[in-house]
Image (spheres, grey):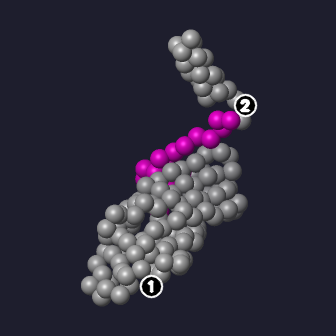
Amino acid sequence: MKQSALLFAILLLTACASSNDGFVDQSSHGCAPGNPVEVEAGLDMPAGIDSFGNTATAHVQLSNNSDDDVTVKSIRVDPRINAQVRYQLDNGYLDVNQVLKEAESEQYEIPLTVRRNSPTMADDPRRTDGRTTSADLAVTVVLSNGEAYRCQFRVPVPLF
């Protein structure tokens, strides 16, 4: 009984993945140089971070290297912070719906909420001496034609 249920589930998943019913209409691309859409990212952190929340800004630059105009539907930023850092950085999303013409670039700013996890960190001057660590950002750019570019970046952030 368990084997037949497992076989049925595998067949159902295979059928859904191979159909043209709209459930799987998005092709995903990596971020190697020379892709039709090139993605670059950086992060600006606020000078002081409290436990209630401040705004950080992810900067995402898109370059259209294709032979056609593309419409950028949305950009999502999913941060992963190094364990040494004493703050939390939330995901950010920007609804864009903008045409990016052939051979043009555009920079977008995505606001992210950042909050300190430990309330005593701001009082320790040894933690604000300009040292940095890194944050890993996963940036997903979705185009109106269903294509998506998911890129990983490691960006410097202050060690608070």
Residue at image location 35% in from the left, 67% down from the top: 134
Seen in the picture, residue 34 relative to 54 is either above or below; the reply is above
Q: Is residue 150 magenta?
A: no
The mark found on residue 48 in the picture is 1
Q: Secondary structure at mark 2?
A: loop
Quadrant for the N terminus in the image: top right
Residue at image location 67% in from the left, 63% down from the top: 96
Asked whether 25 or 5 is in front, the reply is 5
Q: Amino acid at mark 1?
A: Gly
Q: Secondary structure at mark 1?
A: loop
Q: Earlier in the sequence, mark 2 or mark 1?
A: 2
Left or right relative to 4: residue 99: right
x%, y% of residue 31?
46, 51
Residue at image location 61% in from the left, 52% down from the top: 142
Determine whether label 2 and label 1 are within 8 Å by CB: no
The part of the chain drawn in magenta is 23-40
x%, y% of residue 55?
54, 77
Residue 68 at least partly seen? no
Q: Amino acid at mark 2?
A: Asp
The residue where tag 2 is placed is 21
Rounded to the nearest whole Å, what is the CA distance between mark 2 and mark 1? 49 Å
Q: Is residue 30 magenta?
A: yes
Residue 137 at least partly seen? yes
Residue at image location 61% in from the left, 29% down from the top: 17
Q: Residues within 10 Å of mark 1 (few under 14, many from 20)?
A: few
Left or right relative to 67: residue 144: right
